Amino acid sequence: MARPTPLSGFPEWLPDGRIVEQHVLDTLRRVFELHGFGGIETRAVEPLDQLLRKGETSKEVYVLRRLQEEAGETEGASRGDKQLGLHFDLTVPFARYVLENAGHLAFPFKRYQIQKVWRGERPQDGRFREFTQADIDVVGAGELPYHYEVELPLVMAEALGALRDIGVPAVRVLVNNRRVAEGFYRGLGIDAVDEVLRQIDKLDKIGPEKVAALLVSEAGTTTEQAEACLALAAISGSDTGVVDRVRALASRHGVESDLLETGLGELGALIEAASVRAPGVVVADLKIARGLDYYTGSVYETVLVGHEQLGSICSGGRYDTLASDGANTYPGVGLSIGVSRLVSRLLSAGLVRATRSVPSAVVVAVTSEETRDASDAVASALRSRGVPVEVAPAAAKFGKQIRYADRRGIPFVWFPGRLEEDGTRSPDQVKDIRSGEQVDADPATWEPPAEDRFPRVVPAAG
Amino acid sequence: MARPTPLSGFPEWLPDGRIVEQHVLDTLRRVFELHGFGGIETRAVEPLDQLLRKGETSKEVYVLRRLQEEAGETEGASRGDKQLGLHFDLTVPFARYVLENAGHLAFPFKRYQIQKVWRGERPQDGRFREFTQADIDVVGAGELPYHYEVELPLVMAEALGALRDIGVPAVRVLVNNRRVAEGFYRGLGIDAVDEVLRQIDKLDKIGPEKVAALLVSEAGTTTEQAEACLALAAISGSDTGVVDRVRALASRHGVESDLLETGLGELGALIEAASVRAPGVVVADLKIARGLDYYTGSVYETVLVGHEQLGSICSGGRYDTLASDGANTYPGVGLSIGVSRLVSRLLSAGLVRATRSVPSAVVVAVTSEETRDASDAVASALRSRGVPVEVAPAAAKFGKQIRYADRRGIPFVWFPGRLEEDGTRSPDQVKDIRSGEQVDADPATWEPPAEDRFPRVVPAAG
């Protein structure tokens, strides 16, 4: 087998990169669980017809086929087999899981889900075709109180904030509300709400003048309506002054809308609660339009401060109908972190590093293969008190055994005592190979400094 | 959308089942890391030609196709795209990972890998088509000392043994050695070693008489050779007496073989070390034949004592050539736990249960929606000290809020103090809803009993 080359779009990390990713996942999981979110996993596949219910994503689905079928299996043998595809997000599978298990779940049901998803992007686009998402959602049976629309982005902000000590930049959560935009547009007399949102979404790319022209030509607005839409999109801020400015704008344009008022009430409550619980993190930004075509209330995007060009690393919103089986409707609100994109950025930009590439804090040296069992016993004693340890691969010269540790960033090498000529045993010793300090030590009681016990993930130096 | 039904072969757990699975995975990971194994993940897909290098598994592979291709994409656009399939184990991807990253890895390289694998079994077979494996392997560059063949099954025995307090039965690791079998057969004058192994593998199913007949008819042995093979297969035991019995048998049949001696030396060393480090766990069983056709040294199978009919839940062995790129050869030894099969058994046999179905130890009651922020502040204070907490979904009657906790198995409900008429504040109280005991409590200092902080996984009562 020739040396294989990476597959474009399928990222993999070296062991020290995986330590970084695992740390990120563990941190997210811990925060989600502290907020009462339970973990679930769903299968990787869904029936293709379910994956294709939203047309937009249809091109990105990987379809599965058993090789056996291809090899000429008769049609009868595979009859009844539904065509399956790999899930491209965790929302479609979660909605199906809720419907399938509704009788066994307690609502409102709060879950997190950390899994790979797959998108059949063209390899030449340089986008990930396999990546890990970390989602939280709350779903209700029949109804779901608004306060969850406040809670969920704050949980995500806390989870991402918990990564700041490893060097992840601060996050800013940008929020908007479907009801504000739709209420305002309809109050202006515009019916083509989704078309307006589609054009507003281009603001960052092409600027307000071109968007104004498109609003007139594509969404059929008047010039005055277009200007009002752009004025709304220009409003942003992290206090409830935002609400006042929208009201003033609406008043100037003679807009009266119950939907707008409902949306402003919600947006104001979110901003207010966020300013108490996570000051400066949540910003209302009324030009956020992505997702407003399918979310029904709040929408969220999250950027890394100073790395805004990376785009949103955590997005989501409120959907009045996450799932429905005809008899029952399940509204939900949730957000999803693109973990692979985040970790890939942390590693490629050199923002973080692991303090070593293996779990071991100690290598126990082997004096001779005949006394390997003595080294094994030391390792076992240390492990029984939770110290990660490995035993040297061979009874080589100690210098070589120390290099084995050094190459992996393992801080300590343990030398078992030897039987002296007078029949006594010399004491075991442990060496900190960073400082060179070597001291007597007892495997029944010795502990490494707390910061050396496990590999840590830390901001990369300058 | 009608209520969906489960897909045969794709197991999913309810939230409390997932707590059990997560506990199993966390425990395995902890033991692997204590032994210095670093975690890696590989992508879910491999080029189809790599997956099909071993013919046997070719029927079980799921092949991927982008839906886009199917929809009439021109051939040119997909040219250069390798055909991809989902991995069916973690060994093929690991071997590829080692070759691809050899220049960046330190050898011997010890890694664990916990991931889903997929096999395109026919759904009517009732077998898992998606399941989680937990693998450990050590791979060397050019050479790999024998002592790793002793270490790895003991690490697995320790990992599975760490699950005994949740009610997982004791494990027994059955070991055999390719060199012993091959050396003995060849010493008898048999060349069709793999064919003999194939027949010996049927012993448990069809018994020694039928196997004897098949050895003669299919493997071309004499009756006497067949009897000697069966006598070897009948030897088992957990001390080095096993080695003596094989030697005696060989001597009776005039077998002299360096390969046999090497194998017996290895097997004896494994049994001896295991009897010190994990008494009674490792048993030499010379009828173990599965895997001997591709492993080159030790082979391992693991059964749950009292649940032997479940088959092996953890298997593996030594391969002299895990991977090779022509210039370099990488020998390895590893074992793989079928986690889904194990967890499925634990749940379906009612052996274990989670103490609750959600992470939360506490529900903070909400007195009125206007004072939800006070409840949020209590939750935040408790979380800052690592207590998993959720806030009640609605300011319903306290009885209903207590039922919300009760339904999820959450042991504590917290009642924020109220503003009294005289302007003072009544103290917060926390109620253990199991005992009904309700006491004053301060969110800045209160802690739940250690055993209530997180959901635990425990043996299911009788």
Image: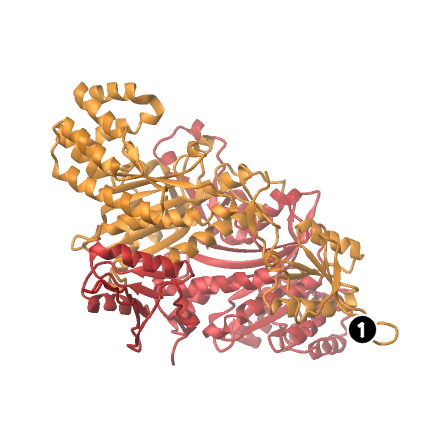
Chain colours: A orange, B red
The number of discs equals 1
Q: Nearer the viewer, residue A385 or B34?
A: A385
Q: Nearer the viewer, residue A237 or A71?
A: A237
Q: Tell me where residue B246 sits by quadrant.
A: bottom right
Subunit bearing disc 1: A
In the picture, the quarter occupied by the C terminus of chain A is top right
On the rendered structure, is A123 left or right of B224?
Answer: left
**Dot 1 crowding, Cα within 10 Å, few <14, some 14–19, many 20+:** few
Toward the bottom, the furthest residue is: B462
Q: Tell me where residue A31 sits by quadrant.
A: bottom left
Q: Tell me where residue A214 sits by quadrant.
A: top left
Secondary structure of the residue carrying numbered label 1: loop
Visible in this render: residue A394? yes
Image coordinates for residue B193, horizontal then vertical, percent: 66, 63
On the rendered structure, is B445 left or right of B133?
Answer: left
On the rendered structure, is B461 left or right of A295?
Answer: right
Image coordinates for residue B373, horizontal then vertical, percent: 27, 54
Toward the right, the furthest residue is: A421
Q: Which residue is mark 1?
A: A425
Q: Nearer the viewer, residue B171 or A207?
A: A207
In the picture, the quarter occupied by the N terminus of chain A is top right
Image coordinates for residue A176, horizontal then vertical, percent: 27, 38
Visible in this render: residue A66? no
Task: Name which residue lies at 22% across and 37% down.
Answer: A243
Relative to A63, residue A203 above or below: above
Image coordinates for residue A190, horizontal then vertical, percent: 15, 28
Amino acid at circle 1: Arg
Relative to B365, residue A402 above or below: above
Task: Name which residue lies at 70% across and 74% down.
Answer: B272
